[in-house]
Image (cartoon, rainbow, N blue to C red):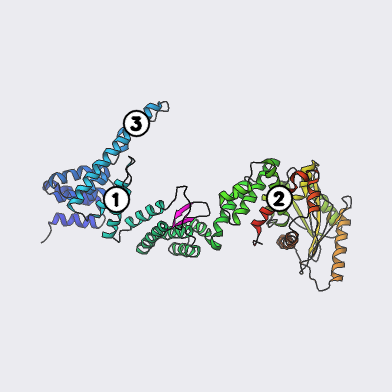
Amino acid sequence: MSLHPDFSRFADAFKQGRHQEALERIDALITANPQAAALYWHRANCLEKLERHAEIAATLDRLLALKPDYAPAIVKRVQFADLGLDEDLGELDDENATEAERARIDAEQRAQALAASMRNEAELRRALAIDPNLVDGLFLLSNTLRYRDDGNSQVAEADALLDRAIELAPLRIDLIDARASLRRSAAMRYDNGPDDADTVKTFSGLRYSRSRLEAALADYETAFALSDEYRYAVRKGMLLHDLGRYDEALAAYDEALATMAADDPKRGFILETRAKSEHNGAGEREQMARLIESGLIGDGKNRKLDEDIAAQALIAAANAIRAGKSVSEAIESRVSDDPDTLMATNIAQQILNVAHEPPPELEIVDAADYPAYQRRFVDAAARDIGALGLRHVGDAEAKGLFLMLGQRVLLRFFADDTGEIGVASFAMKPKWPGLIGFLFLLLTGKWRVHRMLECVSQFDDGTHLSTQYDNPSVFEFGGRVQIERLPRKTPMRDLVARHIARVAQHKLTHPTHVAMTADDLDGMERRWREGQRVKRDYRASIGYITESELKRLLGVHHARFGDKVKSQLALLAEDWAGRD
């Protein structure tokens, strides 16, 4: 049976996406055949494609007046009947409105929404009585029952209706996506009951039902298989991460990335999310630790004393997170409300900072951007050291140490012709206890600018030679870490000359030892890091601090803080076990 030519032209226009033309042709057919109920159905579909949603209900009313039991029209009528429902009463924009007026509007809106929900339920049940296998009707009724705002949502029936819709339409991705999202939300445990065999506890402290997470995962796997859309692979990755299946999570993220263009702006988010699952889930801990530390860096300005004390506690919390503690556990165990415990944590963290100094991350800087007292000292050092034939390598800041130090420090580097001897000069004000060497000043109140000149050579057997001015640090080194301190009144050129002599003597005594060379800032960075490694190993080998060092460090405060510092040090040291 051939179609009417005008209807065939309408059908062609609709199929080819010319929906405005299709609407005009169907309107002409309706004018000629106003009692043809089917034409109103096609008109409603045109309006939906054109997103003229407000006109759909009226069109379906005309259809249902002609054919009251047409179930698909009943369902679509429900779908679009309540558009603009909240606008009927309007919003109360008056800032001076009373609480009573606002409560009245809210109550009226709730009553109107509930009435609409009850009406929609009745209509949908009528449609399903006519056609029990109407997928959209099942889905809409499921949502109507689930989200009813009267405290009596019927979740069990809503779930059964959605399951039935998916059973009838197993290729409908929107239905599978909806169920996966619901299952993911339902997996969250809000109760205070004990964990059981089905409980999954994430790093952030959230608790989930494992079985429900796995059910949501199965739906997202189906959705990705049907659509190949990267968003479903990403959701798979997130669920696998929460389930502790980190390698599978990485594979899921890789599936998502494989479907995306190289310049897709969303790749950055996926790569960042993927990083959480790296190293058996340690990536998430690292991200959270860095988030805490980024708050300490702030705008890059120097920290005040009280800020630095709190900062050290947060650095300790960040390290605890890296070691596997949850966020809540890390904060509770590392950040105390008790002032003495907070100070003890600060001191213990500073002791650990000596051993676990972060990589310097040297960056070239303009000396003019630093305080005058820092520039005056490095300029003086340049004059004296230059007279010995050492050359200026560069001016830099150790950006990696700002988190620990809490202030910006200008470093000026020099090297001899062989590159085996490096010299660093800097000056800083101990207004905070950022360096452990200044902790003595913090506790005794001896505040003054600290000027430092250090000569360093590093050998391939791990021997670290350092010649420097005497300073307030109470820490002693031994083994391969050989530090010699000269009186502060020693001329700079004499200090450098002494180091040159020490290097010559070491090479004479150990002719097979080869010194590292550094001719630029990259070389200085490498030598600095190697020195950090051998000093870290030594400090760890003695338990980070000896009792005599601790007594000298705390002085008259030893009785008050000694035991607390040792207790906090033991606690914080656990966070470094196996990390270096």
At label 3, counting other C-alpha atoms closer than 10 Å, the crowd grade (few under 14, some 14-19, many 20 or more) is: some
Q: How far across and down, in percent of the image, does residue 82 sit?
A: 27, 41
The residue located at (64%, 44%) in the rendering is 336
Could you tell whether 286 is left or right of 519 in the image? left
- What number is the disc on residue 105? 3
Specify which label sits upstream in the sequence, 2 or 3.
3
CA separation in Å, label 1 and label 3: 31 Å
Query: Callout 2, which amino acid?
Result: Ala
* SS class, disc 2: helix
Image coordinates of residue 301 in percent, x first then y, are 67, 44
Is 193 magenta? The answer is yes
Residue assigned mark 1: 157
Q: Is residue 573 magenta?
A: no
Residue to which mark 2 is pinned: 348
Which quadrant, please, contains the C terminus?
Answer: bottom right
Kind of residue sitting beneath label 1: Glu
Which quadrant does the N terminus fall into? bottom left
Give amino acid for label 3.
Answer: Ile
Q: Which residues are magenta?
A: 187-210
Of residues 501 and 533, the one drawn nearer to the viewer in this rendering: 533
Residue 234: quarter of image:
bottom left
Q: Nearer the viewer, residue 103 or 493?
A: 103
Left or right: where does residue 240 sit relative to residue 477? left
Q: Secondary structure at mark 3?
A: helix
Whether residue 406 can be seen here: no
Main SS class of the magenta portion in the image: loop
